[in-house]
Image (spheres, helix red, strand yellow):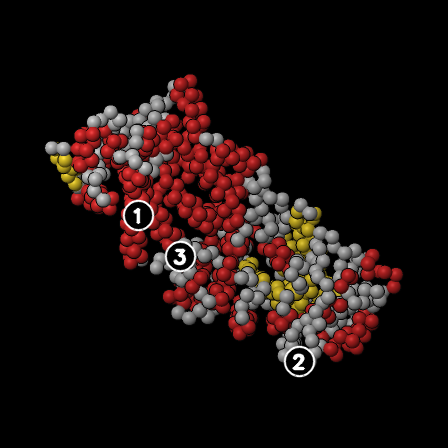
């Protein structure tokens, strides 16, 4: 599962998607939930970014933020507070007219959701839902849109698409539903595709098919893809670059190969250690990351990972508990950044001597 | 689908038979056990034994209870003859017997009064659906704001204020003080304008109660639906909020509303007793009240059967509509 993704990451001169210091905070009765707190990354067309992290690390919230889905449908409730910049194809989305963002949504940027059964409307046929996504952005009559829906269903590998198009979501199997979901997301040839845990609800054999499908479609359309997952295996399959999130912040990012083979952050080590591998001797047990994800209302001072970090006391003067480490370039590794107080040399030593041999 | 409907209709008939049997039993068998003769209810207290005996014979009250029931049921479909005491009367189908008090056949009384009740229930239903559902939707979309709170307080008032209070208040203000309406029922066929003006107050009074309940239900359901993943998907597709709310969210919100609507309408046809009494509308509910205070057994039986039929049929219609709305529901 750790097949290296070929091609070193080269920063695009003009990033197609450029997220800068994105913050998404939700006011609640218990306090301000800082779901995403200063996230920055760039993504070029034709490339795939894998965002990895535990539940509640802010992966989905950031992607919904890019789609502008925190600003629509906030009826009456206390609204989400969003700040930062999202440049998409040269346009800043957070300050743009919501109506303009809506027109981009579904056409230029589309999203595949985790659980296709709950993410599709149970009362409308699959074909209707795909055709609807097409018609909102194209001046097409029902017949053309339906033809387009059949075409897309066929493209994502639904057998007898012309007959299944009138079926309802509950009449599809889990894998079929996810294919239909992908067809719906791709019906307008979006240039940015965000896949939020696209395989989590599926069984393993189907997972591989869906990942293959996403990869093929990306090649075909040359879209930029963000794949959000807690499964490093999925990222290893698809991603050019990896961004590891913890407590709403990016704690490590870099080209997939480097993050997999030279991970810098103890949390990334933990993620790698808890990943099942077929090439590992079965005598070894998985090493889980100890403890549980931090509260996003009272994020631990200093490094947010410090209560769970086995190396928290290594840096002198209790630095990990008082100062938050900033993302810093990893010496000698292009485009690889990590936010950790451990000196780079020490990190390399711990990884090569203590962690890697056990994986 | 067809087989399902046939089966359900069969079940409806069985259920109505059971309702008939129970009601019939309560009115004609139990008085016997407690020593009250239904015949004496018919003739009054001062009748001589000979007259009572004649009535008993004519109404067949001396026969075994099941035989009486059989005559009653066949009478509904085929009509029946009452013979005894030297006279014979033919009661044409559908025969529900004769009123103990007015000696009118029960069926024409029911068919006279049913349109009044249907007018009341139908008109009120239109008002409460429009008012209740739209209030509920707006409240859900404005959740937590002043508009929402004001709407929900009004709804709470609607649910808690009894009809005999709101009805009298409405009558006092609009009828007596302002003189805008007329507290009198006119059949639609005679004068649609008078029909409307006579029913406006009852409609609004009745609809206030139901609109309040529907607003609360719609608000709760809408809030739940808005949290669904498929609503997020609809937005992610780039649909406008108008379509997201009006099409995707409304479709799901209407399902529970429809369920309740079927039951409420069915129950109302049995008589909006308080509203009809307060506004003096000659509907089924009023007939039921009069019949009960007069111990007019055949009339009570007739009203009960109409009400039961309405409820059972309304439920059947709701179940059939379910299958139309929700493709996951299979009728089999």
Q: Residues within 10 Å of mark 3 (few under 14, many from 20)?
A: few
Quadrant into which the C terminus of chain A falls:
bottom right
| Spot occupied by residue A217 in the image (x, y as percentages of width and height) | 53, 69
| Spot occupied by residue B196 in the image (x, y as percentages of width and height) | 33, 28
Residue at (70%, 69%) from the top-left corner?
A288
Q: Which label sits in the foreground, 2 or 1?
A: 1
Residue at (81%, 69%) from the top-left corner?
A344
CA gap, disc 1 and disc 3: 28 Å
Chain of the residue displaying label 1: B
| Spot occupied by residue B314 in the image (x, y as percentages of width and height) | 34, 45
Answer whether labels 2 and 1 touch (C-beta < 8 Å).
no
Helix, strand or loop status at disc 1: helix
Residue at (16%, 37%) from the top-left corner?
B82
| Spot occupied by residue A55 in the image (x, y as percentages of width and height) | 65, 61
Residue A57 visible in image: yes
| As drawn, A281 above or below A59 | below
Asked if badge 1 and badge 3 are on a common chain, one would say: yes
Q: Which label sits in the foreground, 1 or 3?
A: 1
| As drawn, A76 above or below A39 | above
Quadrant into which the N terminus of chain A falls:
bottom right
Left or right of residue B157, residue B87 in this image: left
Of all residues, the one furthest to the right in this rendering is A317
**Residue nearest the viewer, comparing B174 with B298:** B298
Residue B174 visible in image: no
Helix, strand or loop status at disc 2: loop
Give the residue at mark 1: B18
Give the residue at mark 2: A282
Q: Which mark is residue B329?
A: 3
Q: Residues within 10 Å of mark 1 (few under 14, many from 20)?
A: few
Left or right of residue A166, residue A61 in this image: right
């Amino acid at each position: 599962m750790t097949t290296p993704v070929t091609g070193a990451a080269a920063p695009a001169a003009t990033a197609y998607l450029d997220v800068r210091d994105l913050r998404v905070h939700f006011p609640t009765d218990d306090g301000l939930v800082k779901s995403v707190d200063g996230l920055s990354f760039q993504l070029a067309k034709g490339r795939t970014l894998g965002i990895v992290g535990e539940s509640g690390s802010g992966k989905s919230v950031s992607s919904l933020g890019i789609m502008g889905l925190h600003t629509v449908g906030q009826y009456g409730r206390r609204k989400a507070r969003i700040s930062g910049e999202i440049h998409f194809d040269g346009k800043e989305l957070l300050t743009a007219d919501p109506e303009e963002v809506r027109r981009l949504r579904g056409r230029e940027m589309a999203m595949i959701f985790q659980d296709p059964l709950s993410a599709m409307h149970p009362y409308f046929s699959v074909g209707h839902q795909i055709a609807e996504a097409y018609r909102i952005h194209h001046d097409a009559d029902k017949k053309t849109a339906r033809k387009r829906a059949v075409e897309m269903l066929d493209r994502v590998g639904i057998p007898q698409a012309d007959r299944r198009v009138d079926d309802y979501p509950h009449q599809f199997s889990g894998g079929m539903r996810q294919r239909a979901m992908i067809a719906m997301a791709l019906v307008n040839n979006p240039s940015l595709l965000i896949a939020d845990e696209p395989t989590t609800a599926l069984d393993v054999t189907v997972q591989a098919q869906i990942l293959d499908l996403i990869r093929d479609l990306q090649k075909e359309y040359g879209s930029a893809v963000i794949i959000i997952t807690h499964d490093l295996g999925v990222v290893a399959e698809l991603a050019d670059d990896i961004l590891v999130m913890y407590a709403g912040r990016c704690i490590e990012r870099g080209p997939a190969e480097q993050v997999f083979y030279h991970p810098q952050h103890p949390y990334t080590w933990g993620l790698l250690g808890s990943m099942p591998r077929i090439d590992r001797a079965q005598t070894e047990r998985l090493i889980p990351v100890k403890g549980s994800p931090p509260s996003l209302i009272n994020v631990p001072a200093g490094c947010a990972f410090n209560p769970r970090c086995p190396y928290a006391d290594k840096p002198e003067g209790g630095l990990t508990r008082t100062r938050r480490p900033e993302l810093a370039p990893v010496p000698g590794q292009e485009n690889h950044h990590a936010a950790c107080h451990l000196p780079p040399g020490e990190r390399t030593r711990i990884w090569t001597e203590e962690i890697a041999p056990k994986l | 689908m067809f087989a399902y409907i046939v089966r359900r209709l069969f079940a409806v008939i069985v259920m109505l038979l059971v309702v008939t049997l129970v009601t019939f039993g309560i009115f004609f068998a139990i008085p016997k056990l407690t020593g009250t003769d239904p015949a004496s209810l018919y003739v009054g207290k001062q009748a001589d034994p000979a007259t009572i005996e004649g009535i008993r014979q004519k109404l067949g009250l001396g026969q075994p209870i099941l035989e009486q029931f059989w005559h009653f049921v066949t009478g509904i479909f085929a009509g029946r003859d009452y013979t005894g005491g030297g006279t014979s009367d033919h009661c044409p189908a559908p025969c529900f017997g004769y009123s103990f008090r007015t000696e009118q056949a029960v069926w024409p009384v029911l068919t006279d009064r049913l349109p009044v009740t249907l007018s009341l229930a139908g008109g009120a239903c239109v008002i409460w659906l429009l008012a209740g559902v739209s209030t509920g939707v707006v409240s859900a979309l404005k959740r937590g704001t002043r508009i929402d709170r004001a709407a929900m307080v009004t709804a709470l008032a609607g649910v808690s204020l009894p009809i005999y209070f709101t009805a009298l208040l409405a009558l006092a203000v609009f009828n007596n003080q302002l003189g805008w309406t007329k507290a009198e029922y006119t059949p639609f066929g005679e004068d649609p304008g008078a029909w409307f003006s006579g029913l406006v107050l009852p409609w609004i009074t009745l609809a206030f109660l139901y609109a309040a309940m529907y607003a609360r239900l719609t608000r709760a359901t809408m809030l739940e639906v808005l949290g669904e993943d498929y609503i997020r998907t609809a937005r992610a597709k780039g649909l406008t909020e108008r379509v997201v709310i009006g099409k995707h969210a409304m479709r799901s919100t209407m399902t529970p509303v429809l369920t309740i609507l079927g039951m409420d309408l069915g129950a109302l046809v049995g008589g909006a007793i308080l509203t009809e009494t307060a506004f003096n509308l000659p509907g089924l509910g009023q007939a039921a009240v009069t019949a009960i205070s007069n111990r007019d057994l055949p009339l009570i039986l007739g009203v009960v059967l109409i009400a039961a039929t309405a409820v059972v049929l309304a439920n059947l219609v709701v179940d059939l509509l379910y299958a139309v709305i929700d493709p996951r529901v299979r009728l089999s």
